Amino acid sequence: MGIGIGRPVAPGRAEPREGSREAGDRLRALNGVTLLSAVVNSILVVVKAAVGLLGGSSVLVADAVHSLSDLATDVVAFLSLRVAAKPPDEEHPYGHGRYETVGTAILGLVLLGVAAAIAWEASSRFAESVVPARITLWVAGLSIVPKEWLYQITVRVGRRFESPLVVANAWHHRSDAFSSVAALAGIAGARMGFPILDPAAAVVVAAMIAMVAVSLLAGAIREVTDTALQRDMLRDLGAGIRCLPGVVSLHELRARRMGPRVLVDLHVQVDAATTVSDGHQVAERVRQFVFREQRGISEVLVHIDPEPDQDLSPGDQLSRPRGEIESEVRRIAERVEGVRAVTHVMAHFLNRRVVLQVEIEVDPELRVREAAAVARSLRERLETVAGVGSADIHLELDDLAHQDLAATLERPRDRGR
């Protein structure tokens, strides 16, 4: 049982932790490094493919295909980032962050296909005895430098702006650098009299690409299936939340990733007799704490519970509507001698029972003993009502001092006009 308090991202509204300016800076930085990568990869594809074909090196051609896959994934990353940066709308109330996840999955599938194609092509050349030209050795060696440079720049930007897609693309650059190292070794071995090392190195490159592909796909699957985030983060958040004023206990603290952002929801138990407005204050205190302690969180949903509910099914705590209970309380009170009126009825739904707090108006001329007898009579009748666990009766002796709760709440607003 409880109430959920949070701030879902409204359509057309920026995330709480990321203003439009910060989002714009993020998109420009990620797109900038992706476009730089595309330019470098375009040059490497042309150079490696031309020299590999002319120089008779299957591994350099395989390396060129790897760079071509880099270029393809740069395009996928660029498009995915642009879509993921769109604000929430009616069809995507939580934003478009999952498009980065889709882009990562596509990237992994492309790499897996590239690895299979390279391995198939290289396996058909084991029987050949082609010695690559010397220039293929130079191209393979020199291509390592720009790919490692791209990795360093891309992974730094991706981690800074918390983009798994860009970090994955950076590791694709690193795998291309590794494949160039394998190409260099294969070509060198072939030129030293072991021509089988050239296609063998191509198979090694294919295996390296496949490993990167499997890693990317596994990460995308974990995110799509809402695999829990780091336990250390949740443990630290839970320890801090339990120390906040008004928090009795905490359970069901969960977090899941939505592209570059993180969604958090949790149940917080408050004092059973607290008011809705006080419970809302506790929830807001928890939300602000989570936003303050952890970067990258776009939404926090706090479910307020007046009692532990971990072991209860949704139907266990359902009771009659409060309005129906209040109407029955007033009907019973009308038949109790000495009760002039019922001024307030509060119903607490605890332990599958209703706890009533009722304020009644009696004759101010009554003696205390007589007024107590009226209250006791009403309490005994109310506690026979089905579903009512206990009733607490309060006496209002001076009806002139009584103010309706709604009027009392409106009073400060009238003074400010």
Image (cartoon, rainbow, N blue to C red):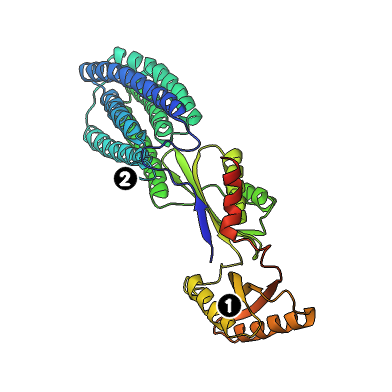
Q: CA distance from mark 1 to mark 2?
A: 40 Å
Residue 183 placement (x, y as % from top left): 35, 24
- How many neighbours does mark 2 have within 10 angstroms: few (below 14), some (14-19), or many (20 or more)? few
Q: Residue at x 35, y 32 (%)?
A: 81
Q: Nearer the viewer, residue 169 or 83?
A: 83
Considering only vertical position in the picture, is 345 above or below 294?
A: below
Residue 153 placement (x, y as % from top left): 45, 21
Residue beneath disc 2: 90
Residue beneath disc 1: 353
- How many neighbours does mark 1 have within 10 angstroms: few (below 14), some (14-19), or many (20 or more)? some
- Quadrant where the C terminus is found in the figure: top right
Figure quadrant of residue 397 = bottom right
Q: Residue at x 59, y 43 (%)?
A: 288
Considering only vertical position in the picture, is 278 above or below 415?
A: below
Look at label 1 and name its amino acid: Arg
Residue 365 placement (x, y as % from top left): 74, 76
Q: Is residue 321 visible?
A: no
